Amino acid sequence: MKFLDEAKVYVKSGDGGNGCMSFRREKYIEFGGPDGGNGGRGGDVILACAEGLNTLIDFRYQQHFKAGRGVHGMGRDRTGARGVDKIITVPAGTQILAEDKETLLADLTVPGQRVVLLEGGRGGFGNAHFKSATNRAPRRTEPGAPGSEAWIWLRLKLIADVGLVGMPNAGKSTLISAVSRARPKVADYPFTTLHPNLGVVRRDDREMVIADIPGLIEGASEGVGLGTRFLGHVERCGALLHLIDATAEDPLANYRTVRSELEAYGPVLADKREIVVLNKCDAVDDEALARLRSDLEDVSGRDVMVISAVAGTGVDATLNALFDAVAEARGGEEEGDDDADEDVDAFLHDGGA
């Protein structure tokens, strides 16, 4: 399955059914009277958060979604049926944005969460509704109200406990394949990873999800390289695992580059707990590795862990540190965004478009 984290779709709620104009025609009843029923309400457009999805690839093949129209009113005071709602399922972590791509309408983060994006049009009144003591045979009906329509953007931000960040070829894909059942492509050239990969790590009774993010380079926060559009995927992570290649030409410069891009993206990433890990320790002699580790601790201001993802050296200790960081982050999590309904109400007030 291909990974797609952004899609533009057209949504339209159902039009309301028209009211009916009808008069009773029954044998042995001298005066019939109006009996035209009301039209049914149009269907709503509903977005629902579903389990088992981690990409928006389905929206590459279908971009138009329309709810059903309300059935017209009928004689004998029969009200038309309500239009069928259009339920659009999206992965957890999907943001719904207006056409300007800036206004956040809703943020679906919990499976089972639903939001009514567009309400269906009201059904029109039949002539029986207008009957009164002074107007016993009204010939007035109302058409159904039209539904709302809009173009919206769906933007997926993966929900993971840990985000793997680092320069290209730092060994992120190798590490996630070593600690989970994820099998990302691993090769000896930059930008092997072209889209995020998710891996579930289980140890005893503990579990966490790690997201492997494509490599970052200088200028990523401004649109350079592959990593720029994927920085948003680590926004929801509880902690960052900053992986550094010990065999690189200048590991300290690599750390500074990635760190500066995280800070340039905004405080949401800069303030996250960061665990710095020096990878590929089996390819460097002990003396050089000790010196590099000491220099990196001075630059980062953090304790640096040393591992070899291929040989498995130090991996268990790193995972224990990650589990502790994830537990701390989960303990400090706040409840979901309570303002989502207000944003959608404002969107509906403006007519959807």
Image (cartoon, grey):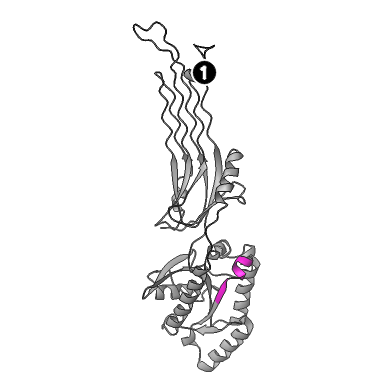
Residue 83, by quadrant, is top left
Closer to us: 232 or 324 = 324
Question: Which element is circle 1 on?
Answer: helix
Residue 305 sits above or below residue 226 on the image: below
Q: Let me know if residue 297 is in the magenta part.
A: no
Residue 162 position in % (x across, y down): 49, 70
> Which amino acid type is marked by label 1?
Phe
Residue 98 sits above or below residue 41 on the image: below
Residue 240 sits above or below residue 351 on the image: below
* Point 42% across, 27% down: residue: 80
Position of the C terminus, as image quadrant, is: top right
Residue 10 sits above or below residue 211 on the image: above
* Point 44% across, 76% down: residue: 175
**The magenta segment:** 267-274
Residue 85 position in % (x across, y down): 44, 39
Residue 34 position in % (x across, y down): 45, 14
Closer to us: 235 or 349 = 349
User: 10 Å neighbourhood of mark 1: few (<14), some, or many (≥20)?
Assistant: some
Name the residue beneath numbered marker 1: 130
